Image (tube, helix red, strand yellow):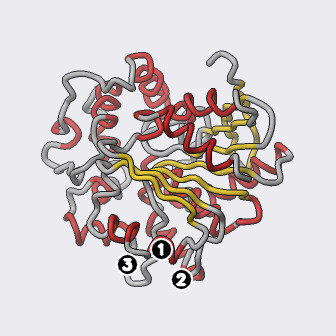
Amino acid sequence: MEKIEHTTVATNGINMHVASIGTGPVVLFLHGFPELWYSWRHQLLYLSSLGYRCIAPDLRGYGDTDAPPSPASYSAFHIVGDLVALLDQLGIEQVFLVGHDWGAMMAWYFCWFRPDRIKAVINLSVPFLPRNPALDFADGFRALFGNDYYFCRFQEPGEAEEDFACVDTAMLMKKFFSLFGPNPLMIPKEVGARGLPTPDALPSWLSEEDINYYATKFKQTGFTGGLNYYRASHLNWELTAPWTGSQIKVPAKFIVGDQDIVYNIPGVKEYISDGGFKRDVPCLQDVVLMEGVFHFINQEKADEISAHIYEFINKF
């Protein structure tokens, strides 16, 4: 871990913290919520040892990267803009792109907006979800699960932050990393984050040291930056209207655990297996379903995920 270099890069009007290691073709890693560059620690070490230059930023709003306060500063155009500017600043023309959770969502947007910068994409947990011209994600989830569903609960600025403040940050991280699948994550307003189940023990893939790293950073920054990705979902829906019905035309691989919260949303399994996903991502070359695996797949099954990434990008 001490071989990983940490730098700050001025990009798209913000300062972005970037972790990097290795030399060779570039692999760019995009983390999700509530995470940091650190979620890719295993993949950075694995792939750099095999001749790749691995780059994992703290995305806008997270860790040691700037966090503008307004949800309107977290559209997919802002996030992809940050990443294009990062590549420009580093003098990198094209990358292999790897995303998880919100990072996977942003990776799909990156492929949609600037396919010329992506050699191939490997996304974890979140398949490409085509724009529904009738309703945005929050409205769709509200119709499926009601207002207590976490995605809906996170919409109101300040509300989730106030709720999270009632729980010790390290304990909150333990709760989050033990949740997200397979059942819908509900956070009723009257009990809030305090009512989320507290794990008896950490999962085997997570140490107290890991929890403390996340907790220290989120204590410093709060959660507003990460929550603003959820709050910008309607803005993304509005701004991506011109892309309705357009395909992702980048070579792609998708990996998901069968216990993942996203995989178990009604309709997602069928979309992946019955041809919808392949229709929208015609260069989708491989779908890997990992049995008994939950949401934080890049940490839970670190070596397998690293090997899957290497096997795919090594073809190009």
**Mark 1 and 2 residues: CB-CB less than 8 Å, in contact?**
yes
Q: Where does label 2 land, which residue?
A: 245
- Counting from the top left corner in percent of width and height, residue 262 is at 34, 56
Indicate whether 228 appears above or below 109: above
Amino acid type for the residue under numbered disc 1: Pro
Task: From the viewer's perspective, tell me whether residue 67 is left or right of residue 234.
Answer: right
Q: CA distance from mark 2 to mark 3?
A: 14 Å
Name the quadrant of the N terminus. Answer: top right
Amino acid type for the residue under numbered disc 3: Leu
| Disc on the earlier residue, 1 or 2 | 1
At label 2, counting other C-alpha atoms closer than 10 Å, the crowd grade (few under 14, some 14-19, many 20 or more) is: few
Residue at 32 percent across and 37 percent down: it is: 176
Q: Where does label 3 land, which residue?
A: 135
- Callout 2: helix, strand or loop? loop
At label 3, counting other C-alpha atoms closer than 10 Å, the crowd grade (few under 14, some 14-19, many 20 or more) is: few
- Counting from the top left corner in percent of width and height, residue 39 is at 51, 34
Q: Where does label 1 land, which residue?
A: 130
Between 163 and 301, the residue placed more toward the observer is 301
| Quarter of the figure with residue 135 | bottom left
Amino acid type for the residue under numbered disc 2: Gly
- Callout 1: helix, strand or loop? loop
At label 1, counting other C-alpha atoms closer than 10 Å, the crowd grade (few under 14, some 14-19, many 20 or more) is: some
Q: CA distance from mark 1 to mark 2?
A: 7 Å
